[in-house]
Image: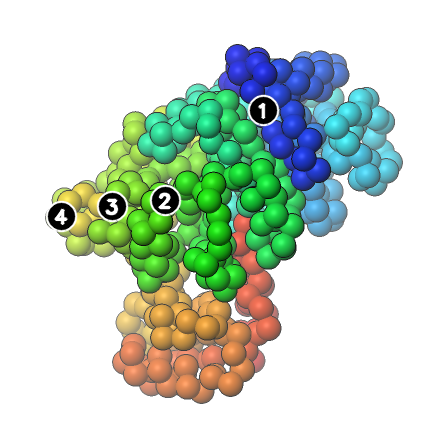
């Protein structure tokens, strides 16, 4: 078993939106009951995830009994879900009970905790590698068949490492702000179940009053967020909120602007709390780096140092290791949490470990003289403008720094950058601002208004949806 739930016995494992409290003994019994209904032995189960007790119990039971779950959002577009099912042919589906009727081709095998276990018409369609524990979509996925193949050793190694550097124990009470099918949200579940903490499960968002009512009533001690989460918190005047139980805020899922990093680090320092910026990818199970809270102000803008058991290197375009500080190259990570690789079809589920503990991240980074690392952008997030290389992520940060009240994303093709902003009154002003700052003729920029930046449930920008506006 990955989680020895019964060891925490009568401690409260989960508090749900209705205030129901489930002990670890109850959670163990429920997860065992769900797993026992899977008659096909070691097989594949699609879990349609929500931040609810049924979703959690199913996930824990499946992994503990070597039944391999594929975690997807319960509200994933049904055409995309059908495509995934056709590709991987799962033996079972674990779905919210109100959705069970959507799957008329399946039979109900079991139901409890407002979830239903559905048997599909497929049984052992594909063989599964002995080490395969879990399949997750990549963070930017919108239904792509590409899945990340995680092992039991990956989950345990990353869980132990995160528990160590965050110093987690059974007194923690995190509230969910991210979906459990997203690697960052799942890592919060994995680590807190490991130490016997109490998880506050909610489907409410930060923008809803009920979320903050639950936060206060159930005395949440921590939450995690992506950069977009922290942008929203500032608009909600978070720094003025009375949250006496709050101890820790964590951030991952993309680079927070240095200015916002500084503001939250300063707030945490001034109020006796911890603000921990982290860096990770689904391909590395969850986390690869963290910035110790004690350094959050001194090293603001940094993603920190490798997690316990991990190692970074930075390579140049020829693959040579860069040994001098402040030189940008591609970030490479090595550690026991590096996953086996991708799957794009059912036959890939039996593949051996392809990455052998080494992940070329696709992120550009540098380190300072003290050994702290800084992400400078994505390797593919560059354009050539009139022969010069331009970092799209840095351009976004430049606009947001100058115009903090608007949202901005950048894309484009060589010699034409498309800048999308949420303020229709400043289009020409921003175009001229970028031309001056980046030293290009203004014709290099097309600045367009959009009502809202398209994002997925994890707050990640869906850049592909902006391509429809190119050439307009």
- Looking at the image, is 327 positioned above or below residue 105? below
Return the disc, 1 or 3, that comes first in the chain's sequence: 1
Circle 2 — which element?
loop
Indicate which disc residue 328 carries. none
Which circle, 1 or 4, is nearer the viewer?
1
Q: What residue is disc 3 on?
A: 295
Rendering coords of residue 126 (x, y %)? 64, 24
Q: CA distance from mark 2 to mark 1?
A: 24 Å
Local crowd at mark 3 within 10 Å, few (<14), some, or many (≥20)? Answer: some
Quadrant containing the C terminus is: bottom right
- Report whether residue 384 is seen: no
Give the numbered dot on residue 12: 1
* C-alpha separation, residue under disc 1 versus residue under disc 4: 45 Å
- State which tag comes first along the sequence, 4 or 2: 2
Residue linked to disc 2: 273
Give the spatial CA distance, label 1 vs label 3: 33 Å
Mark 1 surroundings within 10 Å by alpha-carbon count, few (fewer than 14), some (14 through 19), many (20 or more) = many
Residue located 51% across and 46% down the image: 139
Q: How is the image coloured?
A: rainbow
């Amino acid at each position: 078993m990955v989680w020895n739930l019964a060891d925490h016995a009568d401690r409260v494992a989960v508090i749900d939106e209705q205030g129901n409290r489930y002990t670890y003994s109850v959670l163990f019994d429920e997860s065992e009951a769900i797993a026992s209904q899977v008659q096909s032995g070691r097989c594949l189960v699609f879990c349609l995830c929500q931040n609810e007790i049924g979703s959690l119990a199913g996930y824990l039971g499946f992994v503990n009994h070597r039944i391999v779950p594929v975690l997807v959002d319960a509200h994933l577009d049904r055409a995309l879900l059908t495509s995934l099912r056709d590709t991987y042919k799962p033996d079972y589906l674990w779905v919210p009970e109100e959705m069970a009727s959507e799957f008329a081709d399946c039979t109900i095998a079991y139901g409890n905790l407002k979830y239903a276990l559905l048997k599909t018409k497929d049984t052992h369609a594909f063989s599964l590698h002995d080490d395969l524990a879990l399949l997750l979509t990549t963070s930017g996925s919108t239904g792509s068949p590409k899945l990340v193949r995680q092992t039991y050793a990956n989950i345990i190694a990353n869980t132990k490492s995160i528990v160590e550097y965050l110093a987690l124990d059974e007194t923690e009470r995190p509230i969910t702000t991210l979906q459990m099918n997203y690697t960052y949200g799942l890592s919060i579940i994995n680590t807190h179940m490991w130490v016997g903490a109490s998880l506050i499960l909610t489907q409410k968002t930060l923008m809803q009053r009920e979320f903050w009512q639950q936060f206060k009533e159930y005395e949440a001690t921590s939450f995690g967020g992506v950069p977009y989460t922290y942008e929203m918190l500032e608009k909600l005047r978070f720094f003025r909120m009375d949250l006496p139980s709050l101890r820790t805020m964590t951030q991952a899922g993309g680079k927070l602007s240095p200015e916002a990093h500084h503001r939250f680090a300063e707030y945490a320092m001034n109020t006796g709390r911890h603000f921990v910026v982290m860096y990770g990818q689904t391909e590395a199970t969850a986390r690869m780096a963290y910035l110790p809270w004690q350094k959050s102000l001194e090293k603001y803008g940094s993603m920190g140092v490798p997690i316990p058991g991990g190692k970074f290197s930075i390579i140049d375009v020829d693959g040579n290791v860069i040994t001098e500080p402040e030189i940008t190259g591609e970030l490479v990570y090595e550690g026991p949490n590096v996953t086996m690789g991708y799957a794009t079809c059912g036959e890939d589920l039996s593949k051996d470990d392809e990455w052998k503990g080494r992940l070329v991240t696709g992120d550009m980074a540098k380190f300072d003289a003290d050994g702290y690392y800084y992400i400078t952008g994505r390797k593919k997030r560059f354009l050539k403008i009139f022969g010069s290389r331009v970092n799209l992520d840095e351009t976004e940060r430049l606009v947001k720094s100058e115009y903090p009240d608007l949202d901005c994303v950048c894309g484009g093709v060589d010699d034409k950058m498309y800048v999308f902003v949420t303020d229709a009154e400043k289009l020409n002003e921003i175009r001229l601002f970028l031309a001056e700052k980046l030293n290009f003729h203004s014709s290099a920029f097309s600045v367009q208004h959009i009502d809202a930046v398209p994002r997925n449930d994890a707050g990640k920008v869906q850049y592909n949806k902006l391509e429809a506006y190119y050439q307009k």
